[in-house]
Amino acid sequence: MLGLKVVATASREESIAFVKKMGADYIINHREPLQKGLEAHGIAQVDHTFHTWDLDDDYLKQIVAITKVYGSIGYITSKQGTAINPIFMKAQSLCAELMFTRLMHGVEIEKHGEILAKAQPLFDEGKLISNVTDVKPFSLENVKAGLKLLKSGKAMGKVAFTHE
């Protein structure tokens, strides 16, 4: 859809199947050095990196190494105290992403609805695929179980709760 080649990380059979389903072109094992995994696919570096787990110093150093000069690194959460200095040597852009930033800060609130309105037809046409893998009724027990799964590092996709 965007003309990008996507490299995803996965280490278990079920997570490999999941990232393939989500459209990954290449898969590397995140438990091994990332550079080694890319090189196994004939890839030296990437233009953009998006990290969806707690970003820490070790992983950031690996991401900086595999991302090209002037490349971009996006992330959704980091461990407290993660040093961002390594990105300066390659003049890379670092961008934090939080879905509800506009709503939380009252900035361009209408954009949230506009984005959802543009995304809906893409889901309907099958061009976008939901990454929700676990839907349960909202309860204290289910929230605790969902948090336990997320903290285990074995979650795939998103855990969602319904209000019935």
Image (cartoon, grey):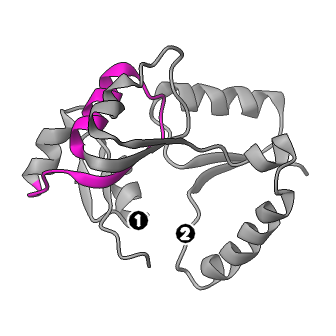
Residue beneath disc 2: 129
**Secondary element type, mark 1:** helix
Compared across the picture, whether 146 is left or right of 140 comes to left
152 up-or-down from 11: above or below: above
Residue at horizontal 41 percent and vertical 23 percent from the top: 56
Q: Is residue 10 visible?
A: yes
Q: Helix, strand or loop at disc 2?
A: loop
Judged left or right of residue 138, residue 44 is: left
Q: Residue 115's image quarter? A: bottom right
Please give the name of the residue rendered at 16% of the width and 40% of the height, measured from the top-left corner. 35
- For the residues labelled 2 and 1, the Cα–Cα distance comes to 9 Å
Magenta-highlighted residues: 41-67
Quadrant assignment for the N terminus: bottom left
**Residue at left offset 31%, top offset 22%:** 58
Q: Is residue 55 magenta?
A: yes
In the rendered structure, are the residues bearing label 2 and label 1 in contact, judged by CB atoms less than 8 Å apart? yes
